[in-house]
Image (cartoon, grey):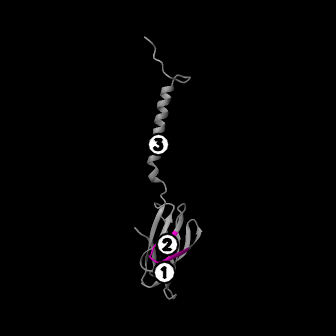
Amino acid sequence: MRPRVTRNDADGHGRARMRSGVATGLIVVALAAGSCDSGPSAGDLVFNLTTPNQDDGAIQFRLTSVAPAAIVDVAAECQGCQVFTQAVSDTEVRGVLLGTVVPGAALRVTVSDRKAAGYAATVAAVSNRQYGLRSAVGYTLAPAP
């Protein structure tokens, strides 16, 4: 009978090490694949405007998030509207929404993590379409469900 020849490293445990390395590699891949859903998920949030009026022409607002979630971009969501913004920091943006502003979808906010809690908006000032200032009481900007 001829002895069976196997490929081993210096201490004679080559196959065992190879199996152990393959198993470790599979575990690492499985853990990485399983954790993909738990990381940040960038995307857009739509903020809806609640207003007691139907003739708004400008809304001054402030958007905030809780770090490390960041506000990346802000766009007008209402038809025919424009938005002008100034980033104060990664977690605060101030801006003005202009145009035929009506209740409903007003802003599309691109964020670094849609899953993060703490995105908020406040209405600071309002004017009608004839540039008359009005009270901001009764106005809200809130993320759509």
Give the number of the mark in front: 3 or 2.
3
Query: CB of mark 3 within 8 Å of CB of mark 2?
Result: no
The quarter of the rendered structure image containing the N terminus is: top left
Q: Residue at x 48, y 18 (%)?
A: 5
- The percent position of residue 14, horizontal first and vertical second, equals 51, 26
Query: CB of mark 1 within 8 Å of CB of mark 2?
Result: no
Foreground residue, 108 or 144? 108
Asked if the stretch drawn in magenta spans residue 76, the answer is: yes
- The percent position of residue 46, horizontal first and vertical second, equals 44, 69
Q: Is residue 83 above or below residue 30?
A: below
Q: Which residue is mark 2?
A: 121
Q: Which residue is mark 3?
A: 29
Q: Amino acid at mark 3?
A: Val
Magenta region: 74-84
- The percent position of residue 70, horizontal first and vertical second, equals 54, 63
Q: Amino acid at mark 2?
A: Ala
Q: Which residue is mark 1?
A: 99
Count every numbered label the image shows and give the total.
3
